Amino acid sequence: MIDTVVLNIPREQVQVEANSNGYRSWDLQSRTSTYEKHTKNPPRGLIDGVYRPRITGMKRSIGGGQTVSFIKIEFSVPKMLFGNNLEEISDKDFGAVVERLQDRLCEVGLFIHKMRIANATVAAFHPSKNIVLSDGYTASLVSRELAKINLNKKFDLQKTSFRNGGQSLQGYTQAHAVVVYDKIADLAQSKKRAIDKDPAPRQLSLFQEIKTQQPSLEILRLEIRLTQKAKINGVLKRLGLPKNLTFSQVCKKDVCQKIVQFYWDTLIEGENLFLFGAENNPKNLLKRLLRRYPKLRVKEAVYLVGLSTLCADEGGIRELRVILEKRQSQRGWYRIADDIELLNGSQSDRALHGWVWQIRDTLKSFEPYRMRPP
């Protein structure tokens, strides 16, 4: 449902107590004429298998000789509760998350009332969904198929990357990102190569448990990373939701579900559905195009069949665009992208690969994933 969240709590709402458990006092990380940043993290020797939040103290000048101070708390919600983010929280888990976070903050000498944690300002958060695949589909296979899509057109994602042999797809700007990857395989990656850059102490042992107890388990992770307040409010407004949601409000199934579903529908399916067809034999596609568009000239239909074949080839739309833009302007590519919309319009839901329906069904139900007991 939700993974990482960044909370900002005003300094005056935080009671600073004596340090405990061997924690250091605040360490100065950076300072300029307009702000100071301090961190409060455990000493290097404290390795006890407990997941803890990253804590930063911020002090900023707001003009007129005035300053504002707040505590930034960054953590993975499911890791805080379960020690991993393979399992997902439900709405009823929120109270336990707040209580666990309060305990972790007390360890470093920071006491914050539970109500203030629940009502904290959200500076960033990552709604997400783990999708269990079945019928022989693997997360790596689906990731490679999704790597063929065009991520850049509608959302102006400035960069895309395809990592770990096609096991992950990322499209991102400074304000937001869409990440799709093989969640099980990522558990075993080093911190440098992993998509999850904040591994919990139990992650590696969890991978080993799964390979022993559920070796056929395949989970595709779909994660939306909203990293700026303006982008969060923009997405919420587009979905008809109120802006400036608090921590308790973003940890709701309906909020996270609407955001993940919106990105899937608009960015992935809406632009690229024709790539997911299970019956894209060139001649069958030609017949389908001629039936779907009676006024389409035969020559244009043949061109669209060739375009579909090139887009579905290894490397997908992104590689085709790179090849073509060496010989024509960017405007020429956008004309071709308009033709891709005709291919999308001809794709029937009945002829989609099974994994597309599995993703659709999971996003529709949005039930939290929990590991089976051994």
Image (cartoon, helix red, strand yellow):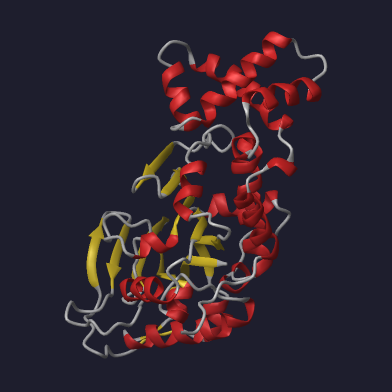
Residue 331 relative to residue 344: left or right: left
Q: Say which quadrant the N terminus sits in.
A: bottom right
Measuring from the top left, give residue 110's x and y in whole percent.
37, 84
- Above or below, comparing residue 144 to residue 244 in the picture: above
Residue 186 relative to residue 142: left or right: left
- Above or below, comparing residue 340 to residue 108 in the picture: above
- The residue located at (22%, 67%) in the rendering is 28
Q: Nearer the viewer, residue 298 or 49?
A: 298
Residue 302 relative to residue 78: left or right: right
- The residue located at (30%, 82%) in the rendering is 49
- The residue located at (64%, 34%) in the rendering is 274
Within the image, what quadrant is residue 166 found in?
top left
- Quick one: which residue is furthest to the left in this view? 45
Q: Nearer the viewer, residue 228 or 176?
A: 176
State how many labels appear: 0
Residue 176: tell me if it is visible: no
Measuring from the top left, give residue 188's x and y in whole percent.
32, 64
Residue 131: tell me if it is visible: yes
- The residue located at (52%, 37%) in the rendering is 151
